[in-house]
Amino acid sequence: MLNASLKQLSAMLAARKISSVELTSEFLKRSRALNPTYNAFITLDEETSLAQAQAADTLIASGRGQSLTGIPIAQKDIFCTKGWLTTCGSKMLSNFISPYDAHVIGRFNAGGAVNIGKTNMDEFAMGSSNETSFYGPVKNPWDTAAVPGGSSGGSACAVAARMAPAATGTDTGGSIRQPAALCGISGLKPTYGLVSRYGMIAFASSLDQGGPMAKSAEDLALMLNVMAGFDARDSTSLEREPEDYTRDLEKPLEGLRIGLPKEYFVKEIDEDVARAVEAAIGQYRKLGAKTVEVSLPNTKLSVPVYYVLAPAEASSNLSRFDGVRYGHRAPDYLDLNDMYRKTRSQGFGAEVKRRILIGTYVLSHGYYDAYYIQAQKLRRLMAQDFAGAFEQCDVIMGPTSPTVAFNLGERSSDPVQMYLSDAYTIAVNLAGLPAMSIPVGFGHKNRPVGLHIIGNYFAEAQMLNVAHQYQLASDWHTRMPKE
Amino acid sequence: MQWETVIGLEVHAQLSTESKIFSGASTAFGAAPNAEACTVDLALPGVLPVLNRGAVERAIRFGLAVGAKINSPSIFARKNYFYPDLPKGYQISQYELPVVEGGHIQLQIVQDGKEQEKTVRLVRAHLEEDAGKSLHEDFQGMSGIDLNRAGTPLLEIVSEPDMRSSAEAVAYAKTLHTLVRWIGICDGNMQEGSFRCDANVSVRPQGSEKLGTRCEIKNLNSFRFLEKAIDYEARRQIEILEDGGAIQQQTRLFDPEKGETRAMRSKEDAQDYRYFPDPDLLPLEISGSWIEEVKKELPELPQQMRSRFEHDYGLSMYDALALTADRDNSEYYEAVAGKLSSDPKLCANWVMGEVSAYLNNEGKSFDVCPLSPAQLAQLLLRIKDGTISGKIAKDVFRQMWEQASAESISWKNRKEVDESLADRIIESQGLRQISDSSALEKLVQEVLTANPKSVEEFKAGKEKAFNALVGQVMKAARGKANPAQVNEILRKKLTE
């Protein structure tokens, strides 16, 4: 059952072979047992989860069950969840019980899914290792000396360790794909605007996008069916006809054109990663795909551009955490400015403060044109690079991360080194494209390697098809870490 | 040295939408603190703004009314600063690309009996959200925050520094105030803060082209304060310059109790607002067809109506200005003048005179006037045709008003109009003017006989005595004698 797909679980529930209460209890028990080791969850709330499971069982019994009804889903603690502690991994929100549901949470609730708990994450989604969480680092279930990646490290860990069948994540610069790669699971960042950001605590509004994390592409498709959809409460939400993302899963890959950016396969990639990625591409050729070399000449600029734009937006987005209306407030202060200063000094961790400082700086009078405006121009160039590449290919492939999971503490004192681990994923957010990561083997110290698949705008169904066909021909995605 | 005052105004007009500019919460004034602050207004984690179409529509209406350019796209930007009544830590405003650019306001100024016209150019008008309120009283050692006003839509209207006196500034503010109410984008309630002015004031030697250093005066919530603050500030600056000092660029606050402005903050303390485009809101695109639609619904503007009143009705600028103070007023006037097209000036005098006075007295506006324009026109017709004198008419008017008020229906809601109201009062009380010349001649003769002294005085050349005799005749007729006829008969008899 731990390895069962969402489709299988759904079938078991519909056939009444198992109840949602039983299924949820099983995963809760496992999560309770493993969480002290992995620290994947910030909040587990058996009572609420089981009440939801009970309601799901009633729905199923009355024949009104949908694809995810009764299935426990782990929710990243960035999604506001009514009645639940919603911390965003920060001391600042360590006392914040949300009075409302994020759009994504509402969609899962409407579909009768069970919220099995809120997952750990880098503070305000700022990090690539889950070490910036106020609630402590998450461990990689393949090797507890390693980081799970970030910022959706808790969700990636929960799925990899089979503490939950699937989870939600958010991706601003790789925060779904990189932890998915490092934990050996599948993760998808949709086209910007496909999943509503309403109730998803903002890091960098023009880059943030919620998406699913699961064991397989097929599971991702089912999750995306629930998560995607227009929401009038998010002005950047796209009004489109609803799609069934499972519709193309079974299409053969004959004639698929895979673009391999020459800038991606360079000496910065670790050899073990390169080997696994090349083997996966070899597998695609066997499945009938062709490869073409493409060029994304501005790839190198993505990290500097990102670290201007994302902190700029973040510095403003995080201004609302001022101790006035909710969240942490310093216990003692002299006056208003002292209250602000102490509250924010105490409430935010070092990485968040670093990015607020960078963001405040690049938006300041006299620097704005040189940094922010310049970065916006380069951002457009990057989108043009991709547009050019997609004239020659259907999907672009490469490694999700240049290395396998690094050790806890290894990079936490070197922010620039940490930022470089997102070099491949960041450009995708800057362009607003969809992309995913799927497991394609193991490297150094038997740590997982992820394949990065980038699609054109709204090509989610096609990307999921590409990933699913690979998973039909391989079993990396079914591998489970030892406890 | 002769000094010239240079003034530019920034007006914040609260737009009359039912809900806020970026949330669905109500904008109604006077609710219990924070009762009208929803999750978006409270800036809870994760909430997002959604632009209110009605606010944009009103901005377009304004832009069209002042002959401005409607920008498409225009961009919403974040103005970042910390204050407890600013929940997000930034205000959503427009910075580099405002929705309305350029345009102008035409002023008619009547001062010391002189009529004067002036054009004030506009720089821009942009959409933004209001902040909440900090309440520093009632909370011992603490401040209360009321976020009901947070997110209320504002149109900030910025003029060029085209005004040269407090009178011009007041005329501009009043014209703008009339206009925003006229086109229905703002209720103009200054007590509730729906229409707020900031004035940029500088002085320079007469004839100089170069602008002096300016000070911005905040908190001018009445036209009187605006005038007083500008006059005070100009004097203050002139005194400094005449003493050899220099003006510091400052933001100053007007203190209505002392009638002074005082420094709030100087340029050195100016904050860096770190404006940047709000990534939560897409660029605002306004289609040509939307603009056309708004244009079609735009009423005749006060400026056009004033010229028409002057041209078509032969009214003075003063009368035309007064009658176009608001749409209800002009509508009422046109309804009266439509019924009595032979004398639009008489109609104007009565609408501006008696009707206005009675309404003011009862704190009412023209739309809820109890007396119908047709009823008033009928009364005025009786003055015109000599049935009653103007003096008697005022008495009849009072009775008409009382009777109409008793029904407590406003003229617009009246299904049937009793047009004979004036006539009935005149007839039932025998107020008809005596125009029968034989009757009048008899009356005059009686007065002449009874007042030989006045007759003598008149004959001795005292014109005053004539007036006294007219008065006597009117008194004998209990006011009902036709004054012109009385004059004529009296003069004839005296000079016989």
Image: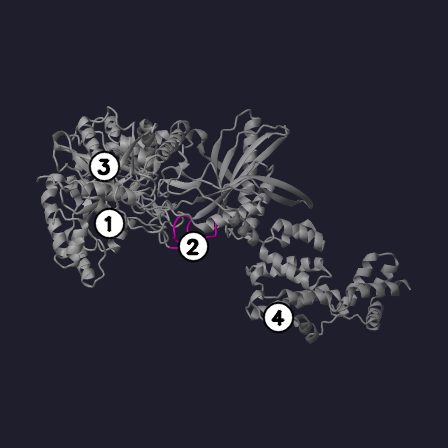
* Separation (CA) of disc 4 from disc 2: 36 Å
Q: From mark 2 to mark 1, how far is it between C-alphas?
A: 45 Å
Classify residue B43 by image quadrant.
top left
SS assignment at label 2: loop
Residue under label 4, please give it.
B417
Q: Is residue A287 left or right of residue B149?
A: left
Nearer-the-camera pick, B429 or B10: B10
What type is the residue that disc 2 sits on?
A: Ala
Subunit of label 2: B
Residue visible at 49% across and 29% down in the picture: B248
Q: Can you tell which mark lies on residue A284?
A: 3
Which of the two discs, 2 and 1, sits closer to the camera? Answer: 1
Question: Would residue B159 be visible to someone looking at this image?
Answer: yes
Amino acid type at mark 1: Leu
Tell which of B186 and A452 is nearer to you.
Answer: A452
The answer to whether mark 2 and mark 1 are in CB contact below 8 A is no
Indicate whether A445 appears above or below A88: above
Question: Whole-percent x and y of residue A266?
Answer: 25, 25
Q: Which mark is residue B462?
A: none
Residue span colored magenta: B14-31
Label 3 in the same subunit as label 4: no
Q: Are marks 4 and 2 in contact (CB under 8 Å)?
A: no
Residue B28 circle label: 2
